Image: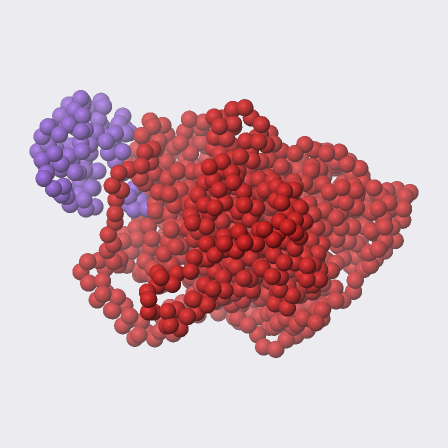
Amino acid sequence: MKTTTENGTAENGTTYWRSLGQLENSPEFQEILAREFPEGITEAPDDVSRRGFLGAIAATVALAGMTSCRKPETKILPFNKRPAGYQPGIAQQYATTILRDGHGIGVLVKSNDGRPTKIEGNPSHPSSLGGSDSQLQAELLQLYDPGRSHEASNAHSRMHAAEEHDGHGEHGGHADHEVNVWEEFAGWLNDATGDMMTKQGGGVHFLMPPSSSPSLQAAIARMTNGSFPKARVHTWTALHRDNEFAGSQLAFGKTVATHCDFAKADVVLTLDCDFLASEGNNLAAARAWGARRKGANNPSRLYAVESCFTTTGTAADHRFRTKSSDIPAVAFALANVLGVGAGSELQRAVSAHDAKAFAKNGKQWLEIVARDLQANAGKCAVIAGRNQSPAVHAIVQAINEKLGNFGKTVIHTAVPAGIGGSCVKSIQELAAAMQAGTVETLVFLGSNPVLDAPADLKFGELLKTKKPKTTVHVGLYADETAKLCDWHLPMAHELESWGDARAFDGTVSLQQPLVAPLHGGVSALEFVAFFGQEVVGNASYEDLPANRDTTYGYELVKSHWQQASGAPDFDTTWWPKALHDGMVEGTAFAAESVTANGGAIAAAVQAWKKPTGIEVSLRACPKMADGRYANNSWMAEIPDPLTKLSWDNAALVSMATAKQLGVQNGDFLTISSGGTQLQVPAWILPGHADDSVTIYLGWGRQPDEHHMKVAHGAGFNAYPLRSSAQQWVLNDAQVSRGQGSYKLVCTQEHGTMAGRALVREADVATNKANPRWAPKQSPLDQAAALHKQTEKDVNKSLWTERGYDLGKESMDEAVRRSPYQWGMVIDLNACTGCSACMTACVAENNIPMVGKIQVERNREMFWIRTDRYFTSRGDNNLEMAEDPQVANQPVPCMQCENAPCESVCPVAATTHSPDGLNDMVYNRCIGTRYCSNNCPYKVRRYNYLDYLGTVPQTKRMAFNPDVTVRSRGVMEKCTYCVQRINGGRIEAKLAGKKVGDGANDVHVTTACAQACPTQAITFGNIIEANSAVARLRGSDLNYGLLSELNTKPRTTYLGRVRNPNPELSNA
Amino acid sequence: MHLRADVGCKSCHGSVDEMDIVRQVQPLSMGWCLECHRDPTSHVRPQGVSVTDATTTEPGRRVDRCRQDPARWSGDAAPHLNPPIHCSACHR
């Protein structure tokens, strides 16, 4: 009996497919399947013929000569005297804070000999709880990005640079002509301050992203309360929360932050909110949600209503796809069904919209959901996304109040100072002041409005035509805005600066630098204090121009907290403890009690009109955010969690909409709105709402290609479509088929494993009736039943096995003596497919990024990949495929006990260790690739080119010194982070302890498991009966991938149990 | 790690106290490492002799006296004298 057909249809009638090509069984897909490797993979690299390539190799060998066949020799310089308290080679960890959307996320940063090399979540910080995501991991590469601004510049220095470039600057020597922009800037500020003070700061404007940093807000207050009372500080970020705060104003008459407790909520409904990945306090939300889903014990139920498939949508038990601009109707209809504001104006307002609510079966769907929410009143939560209007946010508050969730699953707290304002209003005011010509000095402090300001403000033009007298740009990059400013000063990265922030719940988090600013940048706090010419403690603003490695930032933060904390033992206790922990416990905001005002909401609801026609939805990119990671190659190359596109974004559409527009994947769409016309290639995303086009923001930047090499030419910029009035959803856009097409590169068909029960899913009822459903889907189990034998008999090996998991019973002495047998369990119940594990693995294991052309040839080097399968009912039913569910499955090396790769290696470069690891020895590998051919999981990656040899020097500083840097011609794969295992073993041996999960043990975990925000990955010693991983391996849900091949995988999975509403499953 | 296993400093670094100019005396090759890892009891210092003791002569690095105390030094009873010989012990 077969579990699945060749096309991947499981016996329950569900089809698992990775792409539409597979579902349609297109000739192209058949070819990919037959070829095993995509076209070009065995051919020579770019623009080099085979003969030329061999010539190049010969030259390399000749150059290398006798000294070394792979690496040139370099000289090292040891310390003359060792600094006190410092042990070379021993990594240290520091707690600090990284800001996102103005809020602080606590992190622990590993520092090797003064060089930060890895970022992890801080387990005690409430906004991280030890988890991290792709963007947090990628902050490390951001620090070392060679494209960052290296020097301050002004008109004088730029002219000088241009002269040098033209070859006029040669006489007289380089140093004599050096322009010290910092000194010049300090001179300008000294001269200008008198004038600014006379005007009380009138005409001085700042533009910066919202920040909760208490010391920065205090510095701003000192400036505006002191000598510059008329100075204005505007806030702008493209990913603002204006709608949420406006909704809170509507509902409660004040701005409060709303927090959902997903650990307590049994039923959750999200309205276009990707709360598990790209919105709000996503790490804490993912941890709480994951805890409810892991092991399928008492799982919560998640409903998602959204237009574009998001990470949260893949996690949902039921997903309803509809246009983003129709979601207000869903919210109003839900309020109506639940009887929100019964008998009042509000009820009349929501019922007026009810009839227009849905197409197709939406109304019935919603009534069932409403019943489920009602049945779980006080134990459920409804949440709205930042792209939904204030009216939706307000009505969602009213719904949660009606359901009795306030104070239980939905908590309200204050919003930290500096965050709660309207960004759109703020930047509009700035633009108006510039139009009126009242702006004299304009400072962009970490903002890039020329890229991301609302298009109707035409910021770029304003800076040229209505240019204020002086413009200053302080930023990480010499970006689009910097080019149009009089002054540009490099900004320090958060790992280079002193600072602080408040976590989403208000907890004070401290930021300490891991390195001195690499390119002499200043932090926002330092700049504001410098601008105000402040003197703090021993440090003065005058020190800053000469030397940016001063104690200025330190003194600013410390003096603020000395005053703010009021602690008598500040120097001896409060401050050292806060720095050590990275946070101050007990500083979270208290919950506030609020009551929704029905009348105000009713007016907003009445004002809503259902838009018609096709919509264009602009969303934050899960990788690029608002474009801040545009030059980060990790973020560019790691495939998008849903589309699996690498190095590009696209206009995402549903199958029906694509058909209607007459486009296929890669064909250009012409999108025009408000006089702007864009050409963006289409990409069909099954499960996307019809009549809707989604474009992720943050791509397609056109900065200076010499500096921002990664960003240049990657993706398509959607900001020109984004106006002040239509920030997230455009209803007036014209969309039509454009001219030509574009090559989009997608990894979704790489490593296809067609037709086998790889991802195993069931619902709660099945799980209850037959708890061992997951292992029973194995063909082996079925064969055993057929022959009336046990699984073990059927899967008997022809030779005696070493029996790694037998411990003391093993036939092999080395295995018998090993106290450890490593294993990993991945709980598919908690995996959201967010790909944090992939980025963490890249950071830990020095994995190279290979570029778009190489990715197209299936040469990406990720040691762990996240497979995404669409599932729909019916065999090859395209109509059902429009509304699929998604199953995610991270696939690292399985570390098979009977590893097929080992038996085919002609040089024994891959062998087994007594603790059950499938070792890979790079310097033995001769690159036959037999191992990869014989690997049923396709997890081995081959260095076709010398990818790491071309990495710029600054980026090399991000390398983990504990992991070998691989060269061309070498196979590599997941090692279970063997450097961490060995580090832990040595530490344990020295301390007379053991590696394990106990309180007195040395803890070892892999990078992927450590990063996972939902803790879906568990790593440990499988022969220690009490270890977490051993208990999970004993779970009824545990199954091995392709274990019928008798590979005995060490990495196993827990089958995913969905928790569908029985009423809806039958509907 | 090696110090804890009672391997003398001299075993790898040579008699530094007698060198005018510090030089490498052992090949430090993989085969040389494995020679010791495969037969550890022949290469560790006797009980009571400090690893830093430069006066101890170690002809051919072999000090057999540790074998006199089999309870401490052999088999499963001595997990701390179980040097790994698999690849990933060193190649990471």
Q: Which chain is purple?
A: B
Q: Residue at x 25, y 49 (%)?
A: A76
Q: Residue furthest bottom?
A: A739
Quadrant in which residue A944 is drawn: bottom left
Residue A847: x and y in percent read 40, 54
Residue A133 visible in this rendered orientation of the protein: no
Q: Colour of chain A?
A: red
Residue A209: x and y in percent read 61, 51
Q: Residue at x 69, y 37 (%)?
A: A413
Residue B76: x and y in percent read 27, 28
Q: Nearer the viewer, residue A999 or A1034?
A: A999
Look at the picture and state if B35 lies above or below A625. Answer: above
Q: Residue at x 47, y 33 (%)?
A: A580
Residue A416 visible in this rendered orientation of the protein: yes
Q: Nearer the viewer, residue A815 or A550?
A: A550
Image-based side of A49 in relation to A608, left or right: left
Residue B57: x and y in percent read 9, 30
Image-based side of A200 in relation to A6, left or right: right
Look at the picture and state if A183 lies above or below B10. Answer: below
